Image (cartoon, rainbow, N blue to C red):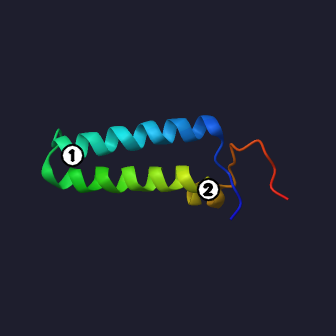
Amino acid sequence: MKKNVGSADKIIRIIIAIAAAYFAYTGAVSSPWNYVLYVVAGIMAVSTVAGCCPLYSILGIGTCKVKEQ
C-alpha cells in the first residue's frame, strides 16, 4: 500500500479519533450517533497507524512528503 498520509495529517487524525471516541464513550451525543462516532474514531485511528487513507487514494491526494519507491 502506498503511504499518502503525512505527519501533520496523522496528528490531526489522531486528535479527531480521540475526540470522537471520548464523545461517544461519555454519551455526550444521542444514542444512534454514538455508533457513528465510534466508526469515525476507528477509521481515523486505522488510517493513522497504516499511513494510508483510502479516500485520499481515490481522490489522488497525498500529504506524505516521502516518495515510496
**Could you tell me the amino acid type at mark 1?**
Tyr
**Could you tell me the amino acid type at mark 2?**
Cys
Mark number, residue 25: 1
Q: Is residue 30 left or right of residue 49?
A: left
Mark number, residue 52: 2
Residue lying farthest front? Answer: 49
Instruction: State the residue at coordinates (43%, 36%).
Output: 15
Residue lying farthest bottom? Answer: 1
The mark total stands at: 2
Residue lying farthest right? Answer: 69
Q: Secondary structure at mark 1?
A: helix
Q: Determine the CA span between mark 2 and mark 1.
A: 26 Å
> What percent of the width, then of the height, locates residue 67?
81, 50
| Crowd band around label 2 with a 10 angstrom C-alpha radius: few (<14), some (14–19), many (20+) | many
> What percent of the width, then of the height, locates residue 55?
57, 57
> What percent of the width, then of the height, locates residue 32?
18, 55
Q: Secondary structure at mark 2?
A: loop
Q: Quadrant of residue 54?
A: bottom right
User: Is residue 41 placed above or below 9 in the rendered structure?
Assistant: below
Callouts 2 and 1 close, C-beta under 8 Å:
no
Q: Is residue 66 left or right of residue 48?
A: right
> What percent of the width, then of the height, locates residue 7?
63, 38
Q: Quadrant of residue 59?
A: bottom right
Mark number, residue 45: none
Instruction: State the residue at coordinates (68%, 65%).
Output: 1
Instruction: State the residue at coordinates (40%, 44%).
Output: 17
First in residue order: circle 2 vs circle 1 = 1
Instruction: State the residue at coordinates (85%, 59%).
Output: 69
| Crowd band around label 1 with a 10 angstrom C-alpha radius: few (<14), some (14–19), many (20+) | some
